[in-house]
Amino acid sequence: MNLDVLLQRQGFGTRRGCRVLVHQGRVAVRGEVIDDPDTQVEEEGTEFSVDGEAWIARGRVVLMMHKPVDYEVSRKPQHHPSVHSLLPEPLNARGVQAAGRLDTDTTGLLLFSDDGTLIHALTSPKHEVHKTYDVTLVHPCTPELIHALKSGVQLHDEPGPLSAVSAAATGPDTLHIVLREGKYHQVKRMIGAAGNRVLALHRPAVGSLSLPADLMPGEWRYLTNEELNRVWGAAPRARA
Ligand code: URA
């Protein structure tokens, strides 16, 4: 494809703007400055730089972020910065979106992609991609609470009770819960309906993909091929 088209698809602006970037000598491909925007390049895997910043062209992107507290999962945040402000502008410009939401005060694994099929696969209740949460409670964790979460609690705007895939105490006031859906404030509402309250919430995993220990709050990275297989494997019916 044309170099200007590649740049446009990678989020560097309009086609016209990308042609200007190239003409201005600000774009290099595999280390060599190219000033002809009609130069033919492969998309997938092409190493290029814009103003000295290195990129690898990707047809579709899937990335993970360790969401920090006090960031909103929204493109139009109201009270706090958006998680999108933690991503490089070209990724936002090419339309990456978060797969589901985490509350402003929730931390943990958040996936992003510009692949609508993947976003749908990860968020649609039909695919039942499990979401794992570590919860710190306001009041002690009791066997009755665990029993209620596992057997099902009725939330007032839901047609039937919602139950956890699993729930287990991990300390006097902490628990681990796995949900099959990702409804609005689901953990907080389920725990509230069962008579306790959430003090802090962290999501260590989505499907079989865990938040890497070396990904610090606010950091992000692309998924490896092995991790990509895992996220797609979490919603196998979507890929078929
Ligand atoms: N459930 C909640 O209540 N909040 C989150 O951020 C995620 C799940």
Image (cartoon, rainbow, N blue to C red):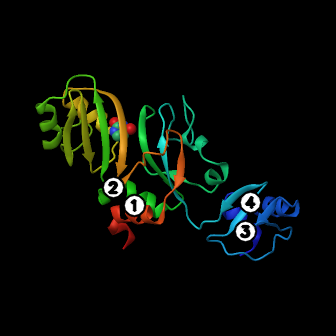
Q: Does the rendering let one see residue 163?
A: no
Name the outermost residue toward the top: 139
Secondary structure of the residue carrying numbered label 2: loop
Q: CA distance from mark 1 to mark 4?
A: 29 Å
Reading the image, the residue beneath label 3 is 5
Reading the image, the residue beneath label 2 is 207
Secondary structure of the residue carrying numbered label 3: helix
Residue at x-position 79% and y-position 54%:
51
Reading the image, the residue beneath label 4 is 49
Q: Position of 136 compared to 54: left or right? A: left
Residue at x-position 82% and y-position 64%:
19
Q: CA distance from mark 3 to mark 2?
A: 35 Å
Residue at x-position 34% and y-position 61%:
234
Tell me if label 3 and label 1 are in contact, CB under 8 Å. Answer: no
Mark linked to residue 166: none
Q: Nearer the viewer, mark 2 or mark 4?
A: 4
Secondary structure of the residue carrying numbered label 4: strand
Q: Nearer the viewer, mark 1 or mark 4?
A: 4
Q: CA distance from mark 3 to mark 4?
A: 15 Å
Q: CA distance from mark 2 to mark 4?
A: 34 Å
Place of residue 92 in the rendered image (x, y in percent of width and height, measured from the top left): 61, 51
Reading the image, the residue beneath label 1 is 231
Secondary structure of the residue carrying numbered label 1: helix
First of labels 3, 1 by sequence position? 3
